[in-house]
Image (tube, rainbow, N blue to C red):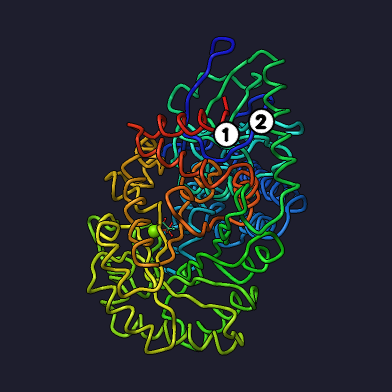
Amino acid sequence: MSPSASLKATAVVPGVGYAPAVWVCPRPELPHEGEPIAGGDVDAEVERFRAAATAVSERLAARAGRAEGNAAEVLLATSKLTLDRGWHRAAVKNIKSGISAESATVAAIEKFVEMFKAAGGVMAERTTDLEDIRDRVIAELRGENEPGLPAVTVPSVLLADDLSPADTATLDPALFVAMVTELGGPTSHTAIIARQLGVPCAVAAGAGLRAIEEGSMTLVDGAKGLITVDPDPEVADAAVAEAARMAEKIAAWSGPGRTADGVSVQLLANVGDGNAARIAAEGDAEGIGLFRTELCFLSAATEPTVENQADIYASVLKAFPDSKIVLRTLDAGSDKPLAFANLDHEDNPALGVRGLRISRSSSGLMERQLDAIALAGEKAGRGEGAPTWVMAPMVATLEEAEWFAGLCRERGLTPGAMIEIPAAALMSHDLMKVLDFVSIGTNDLTQYAMAADRLSPHLAYLTDPWQPAVLRLIDMTCKSGRDTGTPVGVCGEAAADPLLACVLVGLGVNSLSAAATALPGVGAQLAEVTAQQCADAARVALDASDADGARAAVRELFGLE
Ligand code: PEP
Ligand code: MG
């Protein structure tokens, strides 16, 4: 790429990183089936295989030693699986039949992938780990760089076509000062994890990213989605210094959320289990705005009992004993299938039987979950001052909202709904007559408003919650909220974008829920602007003709170049 060339990507995590670029090493090409052993020495080939697997396992174990928590566990488990006797026996048997260590590895892993898939549940989830091990062993056998995250020793800007969740989960934010992917969207795994880690990030940079050579000094502005290669060092240093000043403001900020003129905006956390809730409680979160209950059961083969569910929900409720908590009922289906609830096959699962539709079509599933939520409230000893709100995902009609609200009220629960289908935004006034609150799921609302798959690596320009069409649906929902006196929150990824958060507040959103790590950035930005400036930002964003135009108009209004 020519000096000082810039590339535009989709902005995801604000912040600036300036460092040499490193590329995630590509996956190796797989060998042909049944490739013979070069030279024909079977014993030497078995030895070569064992040495390669041991080297890979040791490297993973060493990385586990440097990692913490979940990441360390993932790496250690993969390190052990690399030396698993079962697949090694199969590989050695293949080598003894005369095929190369590379081909033997592929065949042995393939056999175990099939077995793991047939076993289902947690085992089935480990097939990607097996394929990862296969690629690492093959690269080692060939003397190529290990695929996945490069082992860097100095701060670097990470470039990739896309990242696997495992790679992103083990990424050390001290060594990777920014990341950019060629593919991926603002709600992809890469984006969600980058946000949790607080690493400046831009996605969907397109094929132009490939032109950035390893080692080129690269400046990434995660707020603008701008990547500049070999920038003027003075300009780059100034951008880093400015970002550091903002980081200082973020570090100095403490909740609760409010604008510069003191208008309060509740800042809540999105969580998936008790552990995440406890971590959120240690930070600035004023409560939980989205507990994605389905994430607790992704590997459950059968429906957990009411008692089991209640224990899990109680672990989240206990993390915020005196604060608001919003639980979402199972949002199974599409990108989050549950073995005990999903239909076997659907041609178009994002538009299929998912969310509320699944809970309704599986006899008693919703009722049992609501019983468990009510029981969890008792177990956690929640009283008057600690509202427990329950919302249903994927509500499209008034009749669905009435059905859900009825079930909640029978159990003394406060009913609400996600506004994540355009129909729900259009009908929000009617829905609010039977519901006590709504929370806008901007990830799906954008997907459905723009008819663009949120998982598509090619449609990031459409799956962008700054799209004025999406903002207009939010505006409509907020107007309904004002008319009916119903609280309106946002719990999609849009709430994690500090500038967009100002727009949302200007539109009339009362609470924002995001990854706990994103809250200080949002809070610090809100503290810089008045409610009137937020309203002005909302107006210019609504009037823009596309997502980039909306962003640029708000930046200009706030005097950000
Ligand atoms: C959303 O759609 O914005 C949302 C918060 O729900 P999820 O991302 O879990 O679909
Ligand atoms: Mg959703």
Image quadrant of ligand 1?
bottom left
Which residue corresponds to the image point at 51% horizontal and 78% vertical from the top-left?
Answer: 388
- Dots 1 and 2: beta carbons under 8 Å? yes
| Image coordinates for residue 503, horizontal then vertical, percent | 47, 44
SS at badge 2:
strand
Residue 27 placement (x, y as % from top left): 51, 37
Amino acid type, callout 2: Gly
Horizontal relation, residue 362 to residue 507: left or right: left
Identify the residue shown where x is 30% and y is 57%. 425
Q: Tell me which corner region of the image, top left, top right, bottom left or bottom right, holds residue 150.
A: top right
Tell me the kind of residue under disc 1: Gly
How far is disc 1 from disc 2 in space, using C-alphas? Answer: 8 Å
Mark on residue 164? none
The mark that comes first in sequence, 1 or 2, is: 2
Residue, disc 1: 222
Above or below, comparing residue 429 to residue 476 in the picture = below
Q: How crowded is mark 1: few (under 14 residues within 10 Å), some or many (20 or more)?
A: many
Q: Which of 230 and 517 is in front in this view?
A: 517
